[in-house]
Image (cartoon, helix red, strand yellow):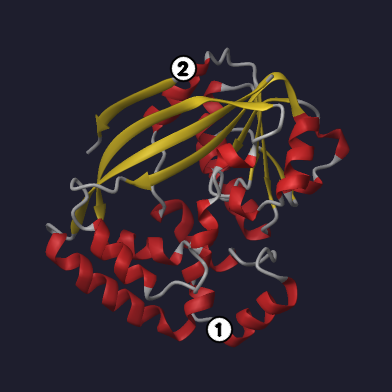
Amino acid sequence: MASSYRLGITISFSRDAVAARTAEKGNNAVGRFASTVAFYERARQPYGEAFFAEVARALGFDGGERLLDLGTGPGLLALGFAPFVGEVVGVDPEPAMIDAAREAAKRAGRPLRLIEGRAETLPADVGLFDLVTIGRALHWMDPERTRSMLDSVVAPFGRILVCRAASVADERNLWLRRYDAAREAWTEKGGEHRYGRDPVAFFAGTRFRHDGAIRVETEQRIPAERLIDRVLSQSSSSPARLGSEVEAMRGAMAEVLEPFARDGFIHEIVEARAEVFKRD
């Protein structure tokens, strides 16, 4: 199954302290994303309303599904799918992200049950779900424990959707190559490669069979300043990690984006994608 179309739509932290906490608790430590919350919702690439509608159409949602969103963050996937399902539960280990998702749900006027904790340690009474969504979080999850948990919570014939939204890496986003190269200079060494976990490989040998992908492209006119905020929305280049170098990063990124900006805005094409895994 595949569906594709294009729709146009027009702080200061101590780096030493953060490094010490990371060394003490490990890279998956709760709190890693705390300083990114203010930037995450507004600056990350949007999935877009058309993506959620197309997934619901392609998979034949009937409006009564139970959906579990793992690594919910500020609720981007949970609230995006909320109009198309009957119940949504979001899980995240970061208290600040849980607070952000709760506020976002209030603004959207949508019920959202939130559980603070890791996906691998869900409470036993969480129940069965027709749909499980995982956004920018699979790389943080312990594979064996996560697969075991999913085997216990995904209902018969249920689906797992591994979702991501990313700037399209072709000539339509002329600014992207220079932007990414500049961003690398401010990114924690080793902080990028972990995001490349292949979901097909992740679920190989399990009861979850890859059932294709759903893709939707959107266009947006985004303030250049928001693309700079996007750097700060990532844990590998967060305000907590950059500390006193945040303003230097902003200046360097602004210089890179300036030739591509028109009245302070950048034209961006984003692909939202869901890899679909169906329980046999």
Between residue 159 and residue 91, name the one nearer to us: 159
Q: Is residue 11 visible?
A: no
Between residue 56 and residue 110, name the one nearer to us: 56
State which tag comes first along the sequence, 2 or 1: 1
Whole-angstrom CA distance, mark 2 to mark 1, is 46 Å
Q: Residue, x 42% and y 22% (percent of image)? A: 2
Residue neighbourhood size for the residue with mark 1, other residues' Cα within 10 Å, grouped as few (<14), some (14–19), many (≥20) = some
Q: Is residue 10 visible?
A: yes
Q: Secondary structure at mark 1?
A: helix
Residue 26 in the image: above or below residue 223: below
Q: Residue, x 46% and y 19% (percent of image)? A: 1
Q: Quadrant of residue 162?
A: top right
Residue 191 in the image: above or below residue 115: below
Q: Quadrant of residue 122?
A: top right
Q: Position of residue 266 (x, y in %)?
A: 20, 54
Residue 91 in the image: above or below residue 110: below
Q: Is residue 48 left or right of residue 32?
A: left
Q: Is residue 108 left or right of residue 128?
A: left
Q: Position of residue 102 (x, y in %)?
A: 62, 46
* Three-letter code for the amino acid on which mark 2 is drawn: Ala
Residue under numbered circle 2: 58
Residue under numbered circle 1: 15
- The disc at residue 269 is none
Q: Position of residue 217 (x, y in %)?
A: 31, 34
* Three-letter code for the amino acid on which mark 1 is drawn: Arg
Residue neighbourhood size for the residue with mark 2, other residues' Cα within 10 Å, grouped as few (<14), some (14–19), many (≥20) = few
Between residue 196 and residue 232, name the one nearer to us: 196
Q: Quadrant of the C terminus?
A: top right
